[in-house]
Image (cartoon, rainbow, N blue to C red):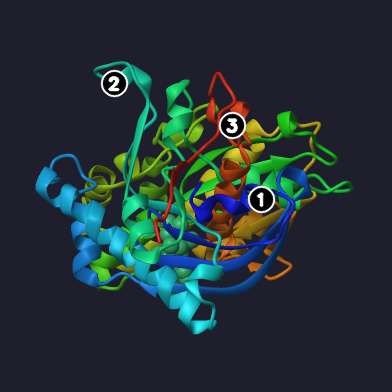
Amino acid sequence: LPSSIKFLNPKSEKTAIGLLSGTSVDGIDAILLKIKNCGTETKVKILDFKTFPIPKTLKASILLNSNNSSAKIVNICELNVYLAKMFANAALNICKKNKIKTEKVDFIGSHGQTIHHLPDKSKSRWKVKSTLQIGDPSVISNLTGITTVGDFRIADCTFDGDGAPLVPFLDYILFRSKTNNRGLLNIGGIANITILPKGCSKDEVFAFDTGPGNMLIDSLVKILFNKNFDKNAKIALSGKLNFELFSILQQDYYFKSKPPKSTGRELYGEKFVKEILRFVKRIPKEDIIYTLTEFTAFTIYYNIKKFVPAKIKLNELIVSGGGSCNPLIMKLLQEYLPDVKVKKFNFNGITAESKEAVLFAILANECLCGNPTNMKNVTGSKKDTILGKICLAYN
Ligand SMILES: Nc1ncnc2c1ncn2[C@@H]1O[C@H](COP(=O)(O)OP(=O)(O)O)[C@@H](O)[C@H]1O
Ligand SMILES: [Mg+2]
């Protein structure tokens, strides 16, 4: 056996790296950590976290090639390798920064970059659910010399699962509580929530994508203000709610539909943005950003009210992802949910920004230990399965 799989013993302490680029395409998140055990026994110790910016032209190309009408197979083919190089560099860089030799890193877990996510089987020509992440893990393992586990979502699609969201597994193994009914909300490009009833078992966890996170705000801020995002909600806070736009946004069907459900740029991308742009002539630009920010908070509130059973009275909502840095989203969430304590995520060195990167290191650990990590009542999958593909490094 290659020496690279010596660490399959779950009990030993492993050094690992988690890599991720989310639907916001804002940067590559890399986390360096120690992992011991697996499943509910998992212990992690964070060593470092860093976000590597994605250059503007690369981001533009990823977005273009995530969109069915502008994507080109040549570009996707190349990006699959080029992005993997970027991911590999992020891993090498975080090792160097921490003076850790790559030989000492047991494995990398890499999510890749989602360029398409098609969970709606009824709309599929071939009646399948599918999802596509690029940034090939075997390129990462070859460039780093570190065994890399990647492509975590697709196995779940085999059995009619959405392949998303995946973060509830992490929420369950690391953040469940004996005393509180906890909601864990991640506001990335898309927002997703995990409900952990106090003392829950794995099967009692439920979770779904609530709707847009920062995606609509980011798109409109780019078009109207030529900025990448609304830093600290500065633009939104200089505007106000526009009721006409708000009521039109509420006609969106996804956020009102019943879980299990997941979504992505296919829904809240170009087409949706075009609809909003029709209002630009009549509504101050700042009001559009305010209204979109409130819409994000509203969809989250709506999903909690409608789909969290009344008997599970939420005590706390713990928010992670870039959206937790948006003070207006946080304020509105607290106003919409006066009985729930809304707070920013921070557990043992895992921060609101780094949480998702931890997930992919954890999923890699579980894959290498042979444990299933998809959650059937979250993704809708008919079977338990091991998520991830293992690419061994050859040194
Ligand atoms: N200080 C901030 N103020 C407002 N929004 C922020 C701030 N920091 C990050 N964000 C938002 O978070 C987004 C990135 O969130 P992230 O969790 O990385 O999403 P993804 O997982 O989709 O990459 C940014 O595009 C931006 O919209
Ligand atoms: Mg990101």
Q: Amino acid at mark 2?
A: Ser
Residues at badges 1 and 3 in contact (C-beta under 8 Å)? no
Q: Nearer the viewer, residue 75 or 89?
A: 89
Percent position of residue 387, x then y: 52, 37
Percent position of residue 92, x then y: 42, 73
- Quickly name the residue at label 3: 378
Q: Nearer the viewer, residue 57 or 369?
A: 369
Label 3: few (<14), some (14–19) or many (≥20) C-alpha neighbours in 10 Å: many
| 1 or 3: tag closer to the N-terminus | 1
Q: Residue furthest right?
A: 179
Inter-mark Cα distance, 1 to 2: 31 Å
Does the closest atom of ligand 1 sit within 8 Å of the Cβ of label 1?
no
Q: Amino acid at mark 1?
A: Leu
Q: Quadrant of residue 129?
A: top left
For the residue labelled by badge 1, is the local secondary structure a helix, a strand or a loop? strand
Inter-mark Cα distance, 1 to 3: 14 Å
For the residue labelled by badge 3, is the local secondary structure a helix, a strand or a loop? helix
Left or right, 355 with reference to 163: right
Q: Residue furthest front?
A: 1
- Quickly name the residue at label 1: 184
Q: Is residue 61 visible?
A: yes
Left or right, 204 with reference to 69: right
| 1 or 2: tag closer to the N-terminus | 2
Inter-mark Cα distance, 2 to 3: 21 Å
Label 2: few (<14), some (14–19) or many (≥20) C-alpha neighbours in 10 Å: few
Give the numbered dot on residue 124: 2
Percent position of residue 383, x then y: 57, 21
Image quadrant holding the C terminus, namely bottom left
| 2 or 3: tag closer to the N-terminus | 2
Q: Amino acid at mark 3?
A: Val
